[in-house]
Amino acid sequence: MRAQIRITQTIKRPKELVWSYLSRIDDHVNWMSDAESITFTSSSRSGIGTKFVCLTKVGPIRLRDKMEITNWKEGSEITIQHSGVVSGSGSLSLDEIGEKQTLLTWREDLNFPAIFIAPIGPFVAKKALGRIWKLNLKRFAERVVADPLELDRG
């Protein structure tokens, strides 16, 4: 089953600040409810060619999602390639929509094995994932807005 999902979230902070959070791949487990852990398999932690495995859990399904960053536009976009049981691509991009507002867009184009989706159907699966990821973006926005100095940028 193929799922194409697009979700957006407005964040009331400047794009540069939002990027300082978004670009920390290892921090994604702190706002993505479906991401339990991230283990880097490359020496780099950011930029094109960075590889990592994300232990992902959605309901009873657990996966080791292998990912590689295939595009890194400093300050505005991260694109990853998924390989393994789930394949496809995803991106997180930022657009300035006001002096101190940023639009975060999350796009996923994923291929799932039928065995994962068959019991609930493609439409329900896509809707469930969209709901989870929408809440993830809301958590991310709340994190950035609550304490813009929270992360150690050193």
Image: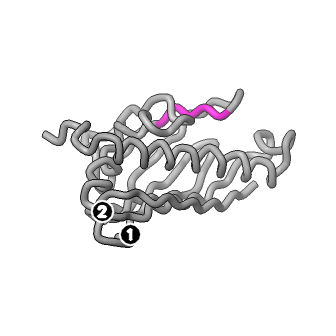
Relative height, residue 141 to residue 32 (above, below): below
Query: Considering only order in the chain, which callout, 1 or 2, is on the residue closer to the N terminus?
Result: 2
Residue picked out by circle 1: 95
Determine the image quadrant of residue 2. bottom right
User: In the shown orientation, is residue 142 left or right of residue 120?
Assistant: left
Kindly check if marks 2 and 1 are in contact, taking CB atoms under 8 A apart as contact: yes
Q: Amino acid at mark 2?
A: Lys
Quadrant where the image shows the N terminus: bottom right
Main secondary structure type of the part rendered in magenta: strand
Specify the segment rendered in magenta: 54-58
Left or right of 142: which side holds 131?
right
- Find disc 2 in the rendering and name its residue: 15
Q: Please, is residue 16 above or below residue 66 in the view? A: below
Q: Where does the image place residue 21, in percent across and percent down from the top left?
A: 31, 47
Among the 4 quarters of the image, the one containing residue 51:
top left
As helix, strand or loop, the secondary structure at mark 1 comes to strand
Amino acid bearing label 1: Asp
Front one among 55 and 103 = 103
